[in-house]
Image (cartoon, coloured by chain):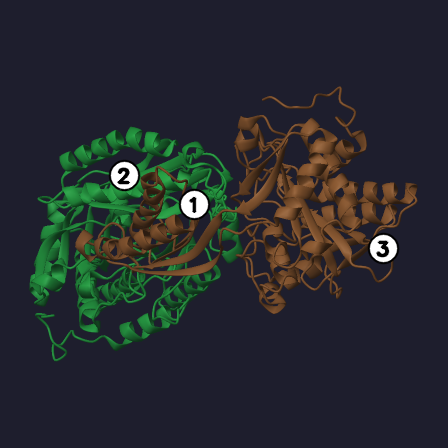
Chain colours: A brown, B green
Amino acid sequence: MSNSRTSSDKYAYDTAFLEDFATLSAFGATPGGGVERQAATAADGEQRAWLHQWLTDRGFEVRYDGVGNQFGLFTVTPGAPYVLSGSHLDSQPLGGRYDGAYGVLASAHAAHRAVQRWNASDGTPRHNVAVVNWFNEEGSRFKPSMMGSAVFTGKLPAETALTTTDPTGTTVEAALREIGTIGDYAGPEVAAYAEIHIEQGRDLENAGTTIGLVGSTWAARKYQVVVRGEQSHTGSTIMADRRDALFGASLLVVAVRELAEQSTDTPLHTSVSEMTVLPNSPVVVAREVRMHVDLRSPDEALLDAAAKRLAESIPGIEERASVTIEQVQTHGWAVAPFPAAGVELAAQAADDLGLSHRTVMTIAGHDSVNMKDVAPAIMLFVPSVEGVSHNEGEFTQDVETCAGTDLLAEVLHRLMSGALDSSR
Amino acid sequence: MSNSRTSSDKYAYDTAFLEDFATLSAFGATPGGGVERQAATAADGEQRAWLHQWLTDRGFEVRYDGVGNQFGLFTVTPGAPYVLSGSHLDSQPLGGRYDGAYGVLASAHAAHRAVQRWNASDGTPRHNVAVVNWFNEEGSRFKPSMMGSAVFTGKLPAETALTTTDPTGTTVEAALREIGTIGDYAGPEVAAYAEIHIEQGRDLENAGTTIGLVGSTWAARKYQVVVRGEQSHTGSTIMADRRDALFGASLLVVAVRELAEQSTDTPLHTSVSEMTVLPNSPVVVAREVRMHVDLRSPDEALLDAAAKRLAESIPGIEERASVTIEQVQTHGWAVAPFPAAGVELAAQAADDLGLSHRTVMTIAGHDSVNMKDVAPAIMLFVPSVEGVSHNEGEFTQDVETCAGTDLLAEVLHRLMSGALDSSR
C-alpha cells in the first residue's frame, strides 16, 4: 500500500508509543497474534490495572464510574470541563490487537503530549483533558455492545447494564467487582470528545490515505430473533411431524444473506453470526434457536426496504419449517453526521502535519457514535491492512499508528484551547 | 387410540411396576413432565443407586464393567450363561420419562417375575437371567450414542469411550468415577438378549396394535461436518470479502432437509440438530461451525443416493459462502435383521397372552442393534402416543407399559429355558 509518509519523516516512529502498544498487546495475547480479553475478564482487569498505573505515573487521576468506565483526568484548571479522548480496551474472542486498544493508548499518549505542550508554552488551556477506556464496547460477553458509553450518555440505564448477564449467568456488576474497576465517579463534564480507531475497512488502504475523518455513520438495525419448534427424535420422527427450529433458523440465515446479494447498487451489509441451539443434541430436533440479525447500510431507505423484505420472508419460513419466529429490534442507529466543524478542525490539523486525509463514513459502531449526541465529537480512522478486523490478523502499520497518535495530540491540543466550543 | 386390551383385563395394571416407574421418573424430573438425566450426571448416579438397591433387595448381584454398564445378575445355575435384558436409564436434555428407562424397569420386573415363576415350578432354567442398564445410550453429553453396548460388543474400544469428553472437557472416566458406577466386571456370558422400548413413532398407534416385534433396523449414516470460514467484523467487512461459516452451515442444513423433501416414495429422514458456532459473537462473522448430519432410511440404495447428492451439493455451498467443508462419516448401521426365530418366539408369547402384535422396523438406534450382532436378540416396542419422543411430552399408556412388561416376563421365561439356543 502507498502512504504519504515514510519512516524518514520526523513523526514516523514514536518508540515510547510502540513499546507501550507492544506491552498492552501482551495482555490476553493469543498464539495466533491476536488478543482475547472480553469485557471484565481477568485479562481486561490486568490491562486496566496497567493503564491505571501508566496514567497515574504521568499525573492523571484515575477514577471509575458505576458501570466500569475508566477515566484518567488531567486537571489544569480546577472546575473547567474536560476534553475527553478514548476508546475501549476490551476485545472480541480471538480478536485483534488494534480494535479499541489502539485508540485508548493513542489517547493516553496524545493527552500526555498535549499537556506537556501546554506546560511548555505561556498559554493556559481553556479545558482540562481526560482519557477514557469505555467498558464493554464489543458486546461479545455482555450485550448490547457500546455499553459503557451508552450508560454515560443516558441511552441505557445503569441498572440495566449492571444486571446484564453473560452466558454463564454472571452479571456485569459481579464481573466488574471481581476485577475491581467499578466506582462511584459521576464522570467529567465533557467540552468535546475525540476518538481514533482502525478503519476496519479497505477504503483508506485502497485510496492510499493515512487518515479518515468520519463525517457520518452508516445506519444499523440489530434484531434478536427466536425460532421456536418442538423437540423430537431426529431418527424416528417422520419429516411431516417435525417442527425443526434449526431448519427454520437456517432458512432465515440464508434469507438474511440474500438481502445483501439482492442489493447491487448501494451497499447493504447483513449478518447472522451468533446462534444458540436448544437442546443442541445430535439426536434431538432443536426446539428453539436464538440468533442475532445485523443489517447496515449508508442508505436508510434501503435499510427500511431490506427490513421490510426480511419481515415478509418470515411467514414462508414459518410455514416451511413448521416453526414460529419472533423478531424484535434490540437497537440500532440512523445515518447521523459528526459535526462539520470537528471534521474541519481535524482536516486542518492533518494538513498542518502533512498527513493525507479523506472524509469517510463509519460502518462499525463506536463509542463516539454515542458521544456525538452529547458533545462535539471528532472520530478519526487509520488504515486497516486488507480491512481485516475482529480477527487475530488485524494489522495497522507502525508508521500509521504513530501518525494517528500525532494527529490526535494536535487535535486534543486545539480542543483544549476551546476550538469547538461554538459547536456545543 | 384403540387398543386390544382394556383396564378390565387381568394383566392390565401392575401396581408395583407403575409405582416403581413413578419413583424412577422422579430422578431428574423437569417441570414440563419429563426428565433430564444425561449420562453420568448426578441424576444418572441417583437413579443407578436406586436400581442397584431395587435389584439387590430381590436377590440380584449388581456389578459394573469398566465403562459403567450396570448389570444385575440372578444366578440360578452357577457357570451357566445369562439371558440378558435391559435398555438405558440415561436421557436427553429435557427428555421423556419412557425412552430407555421403561425398558430397564420392565426388564428388572420381568426378570424378577421369571425367576419367581421358575422358583414356583418344578423345572430348572437352562440359563440364568440378568438385567442391564447400558451406559450412555443417548450420546447427548458424550458421543457417540449407544456407547456402553458398543464397548460391550467390541465395536468401540473401552479406552476410546473412557477418554471421550463432554463439552466442558470432563472425560467419561472422570464422570463415571464421580458417580461411583465403574468397576472391573467383564460382563456375563450372554445366551440371548431382549429389550423393550417405546416405539418413538406412530405405526403401532395408527394400527391400534399393542406390541411391535422388531424385524429389522432402518439403515443410518451419521456425519461430523466442519465448515471453515474466517473471523471478520459483521458490520464493516464488505460482503464480497466474507468467509461466513454460519452462512455455509445454514446452506448445508437446508440442503440436508431438501434430500428428505425430494424423497417422496420411500421414507428418508434427514436431520441437523446440533451446531457449534465459533466464536459465536453477535458482531463477528463465524470462523467455524461444527455440526452433525443424520440420514436414515429403510432403503440402503436410497441412502447411498442421498449421501451422494449431499456430497455433490458441497462444492456449490463452499463457493457461494467462500468456506471449506469437511464431512466425515462417524458411524452408521445397515438395514439388518433381528433373528426370525426371536420374532417368532415373541409373536407366539404375545398370542398366548392375548396381545395384538405386528412386525415393525426400528428407525432409532437401540442397544439391541449392537447386541444382535453377538447374541440372539429380541426387540419389542410398545406404542408412543402421537410418536412423540426426545420430548418432555413423551407418553405411553399404563395399560400398554404393563402389557409390554408382561410380554417381556413371558419372553425371558422362555429364553431361560433355552428357546433360542439353536439360533446362537
Spot occupied by residue A102 in the image (x, y as percentages of width and height)? 68, 39
Q: Chain of mark 3?
A: A
Q: Amino acid at mark 1?
A: Thr
Query: Can you name the residue that lies furthest to the top here?
Result: A8
Q: Chain of mark 2?
A: B
Q: Kindly identify which residue carries mark 3.
A: A75
Task: Answer yes or no: are tags 3 and 1 on the same subunit.
Answer: no
Spot occupied by residue B153 in the image (x, y as percentages of width and height)? 32, 41
Q: Kindly identify which residue carries mark 1.
A: B276
Q: Kindly identify which residue carries mark 2.
A: B332
Figure check: A13 above or below B123: above
What is the CA distance from the residue labelled 2 to the residue labelled 3? 71 Å
Figure check: A22 above or below B67: above
Residue drawn 41% across the image and 33% down it: B240
Relative depth, front residue between A237 and A7: A7
Q: Quick check: A242 left or right of A76?
A: left
Residue drawn 10% across the image and 70% down it: B3
Query: Can you name the residue that lies furthest to the bottom here?
Result: B8
Closest to the camera, between mark 2 and mark 3, is: 3
Q: Which quadrant holds the N terminus of chain B?
A: bottom left
Q: Amino acid at mark 3?
A: Thr
Q: Residues within 10 Å of mark 1 (few under 14, many from 20)?
A: some
What is the CA distance from the residue labelled 3 to the residue labelled 1? 50 Å
Q: Residues within 10 Å of mark 3 (few under 14, many from 20)?
A: some
Residue A352 visible in the current orientation: yes
Residue A89 visible in the current orientation: no
Residue drawn 58% across the image and 64% down it: A156
